[in-house]
Image (spheres, rainbow, N blue to C red):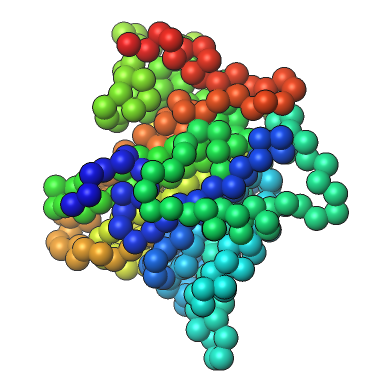
Amino acid sequence: MTELLNLLTDIQGLSVGHATDLQLGSGATVIVFDKPAVASGTVLGGAPGGRDTALLDPSMTVGAVDAFVLSGGSAFGLDAAGGVQAGLREIGRGLEVGTTRVPIVPQAILMDLLNGGDKDWGIHSPYRDMGYQAFKAAVKGAFGLGTIGAGTGATTATFKGGLGSASAVSTAGHRIAALAAVNALGSATLGDGPHFWAAPFELNAEYGGLGLPQAIVPSDTTMRLKGVNVTATTIGIIVTDAVLTKTEAHRLSIMGHDGLARALLPAHLPFDGDAVFAASTGIRPLGDMPAFLELCHLATTVMARAIARGVYEATALPVSDPQPAWRDRFLRRVP
């Protein structure tokens, strides 16, 4: 068994690629499966943006996807899936429909149009090209976190957001991992301090090892928002190597939202578009119900960890008036 990297690519049967434009202040991330993966998803935010997400409902006919896309750009960013489809079509991938193939590439987007980057791109948005670039850049090993790909322009109420990932292994030997682009209307940290809401789930000091503060005071739980009438979104994916049905993948996506709500306060607001996808690469038989219940539990914890890592790994954008990064204020204090 290969050594864990604490990344989504710990799951056999997929690759992850990024396209990043720091001056634009945005980017795209693609998750490409080696073969069609059983998949589903759940949207709990009140202001979502997505492409081909309806087919992920367990009652819908299409049962597997070729790739997922997470992107900045708000509704303009939905072009990124077209670029990924182009890359998949080049290599002959896609759902067979008569004499043609249609790559199945659901997508979720986040709102990063107001982060100070140069969004004057002319007539056509750059996101289709970004999707294609991310597809071509997909790798099976280590990949970047923080201000990269879909996390490039992400922000939160208090610090720069970013792209995070985390993985775990169940007692039955199944691998499960999360990838999240953290662009929350709320905050990943308590009050104005360095402690992450996801601290109880942290492993190996992956986001500083600070734990929780000795005491939590009322000001720590006061609502902090990055604006009123400003849209935001935390988008992510849970993937396991266990064989799942589409219904089981749907449940796993719901459990991923549990992790989102444990890592961000508040979450699932009317102006958030919080969405979580879930997929199975089908490498290992699932076994009994307790094995699936543990995967549900781990879906919660790996998503919470991935969100905290996204903020922890982020760096400020090189644009006017960038939002400060967590590490700019607190990294020197981490033992």
Percent coordinates x, y for residue 222 in the rendering: 52, 17
Q: Residue extending furthest right?
A: 123
Which quadrant holds residue 129?
bottom right
Work out whether 128 lies above or below 298.
below
| Residue found 54% across the figure and 65% down from its top | 105
Please give the count of numbered marks on the rendered protein.
0
Percent coordinates x, y for residue 132 in the rendering: 61, 59
Work out whether 4 lies above or below 84.
above
Please say whether residue 45 is visible from this viewpoint: no
Please say whether residue 40 is visible from this viewpoint: yes
Query: Is residue 230 or residue 278 the one in the foreground?
Result: 278
Percent coordinates x, y for residue 83 in the rendering: 63, 62
| Residue found 58% across the figure and 62% down from its top | 84
Q: Is residue 107 left or right of residue 312?
A: right
Work out whether 115 lies above or below 108.
above
| Residue found 26% across the figure and 43% down from its top | 4
Work out whether 56 lies above or below 28.
below
Which quadrant holds residue 241?
bottom left
Pick the quarter of the image with the C terminus. top left
Q: Residue extending furthest bottom?
A: 98
Query: Is residue 80 or residue 243 the one in the foreground?
Result: 80
Q: Is residue 53 left or right of residue 323?
A: left
Query: Is residue 60 or residue 163 the one in the foreground?
Result: 163
Percent coordinates x, y for residue 106 in the rendering: 54, 62
